[in-house]
Image (spheres, helix red, strand yellow):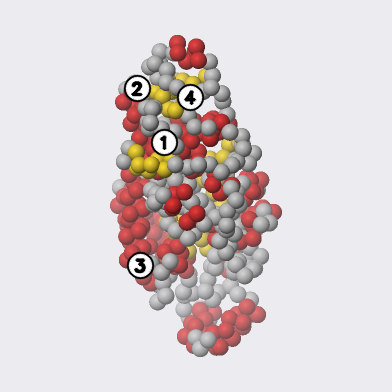
Amino acid sequence: MLLIYLCNRSPRCDYIFDLIFKEEFGIEYRVTTDITEFEACKEEKINYSDSKIPNDFFIKKSSLLFENEIKKQEIKVVQKKGTKVLFPNDNDDLGFDIFSGIFFMVSRYEEYLPFTPDQFGRFKADDSVAFKNDFLHLPVVNIWINIFKDALEKMFPSLQLKSSVFNAIPTYDIDVAYKYRGRNFIRTTGSVLKDILSFKIKNIQERINVLQNKQKDPWDTYEDLMKVILENNFNCIIFFLVADKSIHDRNLNYQNDVMKKLVEKIISFSATGIHPSFYSSSFPEKILIEKKRLEKLSGKKITKSRQHYLKFILPDTYNALLAAGITEDYSMGFSQMQGFRSGTCKPFYFYDLKNEKTTELKIFPVTFMESTVMNNSVNADEAYQKIRSLLEEVKKVNGTFISLWHNHTISETAEYQEWKNVHDKMIQKLVNSLR
């Protein structure tokens, strides 16, 4: 068992030690604040304090993990060990305070501080320390952990630290299940009038053909998706938006028979989750209401979630998810830019910084979202190269590559055909990577 010396314990230290030693390295550890006990220990030991002790692995502590308030931090970023690091030191065995660095990133500490939100009330990617210091594209937390692992194994050859395995989880959001199907008479009539005024005659004929069952709905991509998932044995998750209609929530009515049949079809080949509505971050009671709707439709307990528009407020939204019985969230990514919002490509437990406690909500960071590149006018070829680049970074640290697509963007319509091609190439790349 690894022994760790601290001058005093804190919930933040306990959280980070569990994340690194138990979850990542697969070993038990014990903490002591007794310097005499620590000095007498002849086994593997880590000293996390202000000064070195003979025969220890020394990491010079910063103050972050021993504070019980949220305040602006002076974050210094330097190049060490071949990567960017936070909280650098010059006189310890690692060269930086890895515990504080990881905590700052995975707790999303900077998002608890005052910030200027984007048009939808979200923390902006270009306000992040990662973007400002040009490491948003790197899973730095996992890189740091690997540096730490190598250093520990070199000093303590008898330590047996586990290694992780690369994984991939394709995920899909169903914001609007069908382009034409499932609307009531009033909504259909309104859409037809809009097409007439916009001179979209092709849409009118296409709608008529779909509603008369002469043609498949353009956004009905579910048979192809089922084939891809089953043939490649992917652990896939599909998230349903079952909100009350609003300007940002344009899903089909959840009571519609078309939606009921679709949910029944999806649960036959994929895990499902709730896609809490745009306004659920402002009115968290909506999360439980919408979750119960999906549970009624599916006949299954729903424990997975991803916020619509990736819109959440820390810690309120995550605590509302927990209160609703959600145990896994897949919202941790920036909608404005690709990369690693929390600095990691591996699941981790949410730490409620406001209440200083570890929770049971497991966060699964998003690596790539198709609408991000589409909204930034990135063409399909460039988008695929971005996927390859991100995938390589995840593979280097044996992380989990989580992609986010929507049912309509993998359709064979003229508007999205090139994006479907990117999706299909990504799927083949993931298959090859998992072999």
Q: Nearer the viewer, mark 3 or mark 4?
A: 4
Label 1 vs 4, first from the N-terminus = 4
Q: Position of residue 389 (x, y in %)?
A: 33, 54
Which dot marks residue 288? none
Q: Which residue is mark 3?
A: 380
Q: Position of residue 402 (x, y in %)?
A: 43, 52
Q: Which residue is mark 2?
A: 156
Question: In front: 198, or 231?
Answer: 198
Do the numbered discs 3 and 2 sit on residues whose CB atoms are within 8 Å? no
Residue type, mark 2 in image = Phe
Label 3 vs 4, first from the N-terminus = 4
Number of other residues with Cα within 10 Å of mark 1, as a class: few under 14, some 14 to 19, many 20 or more: many
Residue type, mark 4 in image = Ser
Q: Nearer the viewer, mark 1 or mark 2?
A: 1
Label 1 vs 3, first from the N-terminus = 1
Which residue is depicted at the point 58% across and 81% down? 191
Which dot marks residue 49? 4
Distance CA(mark 4)–CA(mark 2): 20 Å
Does dot 4 land on a helix, a strand or a loop? Answer: strand
Q: Is residue 67 above or below residue 213?
A: above
Q: Which residue is mark 1?
A: 88
Which residue is depicted at the point 63% across and 56% down? 281
Label 4 vs 2, first from the N-terminus = 4
Distance CA(mark 1)–CA(mark 3): 39 Å
Q: Position of residue 322 (x, y in %)?
A: 63, 45
Q: Nearer the viewer, mark 3 or mark 2?
A: 2
Which residue is depicted at the point 38% across and 17% down? 55
Left or right placement of residue 69 versus residue 57 in this view: right
